[in-house]
Amino acid sequence: MMNTPPSVPGRRAELLAAGAATVTVVLWASAFVSIRSAGAAYSPGALALGRLLAGAVALGAICLVRREGWPPRAAWRGIAISGLLWFGFYMVVLNWGEQQVDAGTAALVVNIGPILIALLGSRLLGDAMPPRLLAGMAVSFAGAVAVGLSMSGGGGSSVLGVVLCLLAAVGYAAGVVAQKPALGRASALQVTTFGCLVGAAVCLPFAGQLVHDAADAPVSATLNMLYLGFFPTALAFTTWAYALARTTASRMGATTYAVPALVVLMSWLVLDEVPGLLTLAGGLLCLAGVAVSRSRARVRAGTGAEPVEVAVPERAPEPRS
């Protein structure tokens, strides 16, 4: 039996999904730099609410222009859960946790998230866990540990901060796994927009604090908060949803291990924070692990004496808009 190469449309869709995932990790890495500035002037809840409101305005305007409409009823359960746990709970708890621990400890604890996504995805969504994915996640986590240890400051951690970062990782993982089924019933833009609106509604109790903080905050901090809303939230969460609809939750979770490496690079370029050798080595391990987890095993197939190597495509449900 003759093996046919992947179709051009299929290859194009795969490249678009990879490009969307790349946009996501780059913008989420840049968020750490902006949070460092905005977080000095805004409290955790106020920063989360301001970010989500900015993102909701941008996403809502795009939905109106594109006439997206309301998501189907079948998608609302996943949208509501992801909006509550990821857009709302995760952002507030992570902002709070990063005020209690140093950046290295926060990075270490939060990077449990992709592992939790893989476990939950396998249990609840039936995601496959091939050896390459597991090996890549192990390599990336080792890199994240190296980056975290190199960035940790002595005596900068607290039990409360570690618990908060752990809760953030759990909220992030559960939100991703809840979002995946919704993307089979609604478009990436719909899922992201209404998830952001749910998160903003959850954070409305911080509205008074947002008004108070905004009155005293420097312009640079407010601009960073708006940047967080427009780009790492509105754009990056949409590209994330687009890519997640075309692959498994486990593989997308592993992709986010590129974020620590990019944060190291951006801090070097933007903040003049020269990384040490351990930090650089950890960043390279993160990228290497992502490359392994995103690679595909090749199997031998064909007839006759000369086997032919073909790539095994990843099976994922087609999203419906």
Image: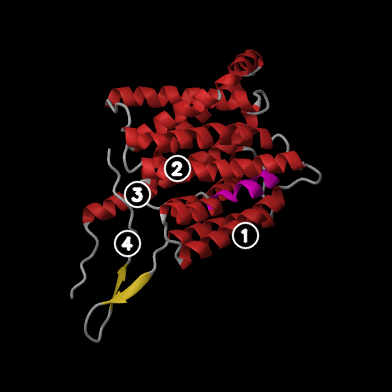
Instruction: Find the distance from the CA under tag 3 to the CA under tag 1.
Output: 27 Å
Most foreground residue, 204 or 19: 204
**On the rendered structure, is 22 left or right of 106?**
left
Q: Which mark is residue 178?
A: 2
Most foreground residue, 270 or 127: 127
Q: Which mark is residue 313?
A: 4
Most foreground residue, 191 or 29: 191
Q: Which is more N-terminal, label 3 or label 4?
A: 3
Q: Secondary structure at mark 1?
A: helix
Residue type at mark 1: give it: Ala
Task: Please tell me which residue is depicted at 66% across the width and 14% down the height of the picture.
Answer: 216
Q: Quadrant of the N terminus?
A: bottom left
Q: Position of residue 33 (x, y in %)?
A: 60, 36
Q: Which residues are magenta?
A: 101-114
Instruction: Find the distance from the CA under tag 4 to the CA under tag 3.
Output: 12 Å
Instruction: Find the distance from the CA under tag 4 to the CA under tag 1.
Output: 28 Å
- Residue neighbourhood size for the residue with mark 1, other residues' Cα within 10 Å, grouped as few (<14), some (14–19), many (≥20): some
Residue type at mark 3: give it: Arg
Which residue is disc 3 drawn over? 246
Instruction: Judge whether residue 266 can be spotted in this image.
Output: no
Q: Quadrant of residue 296?
A: bottom left
Instruction: Find the distance from the CA under tag 2 to the CA under tag 1.
Output: 27 Å
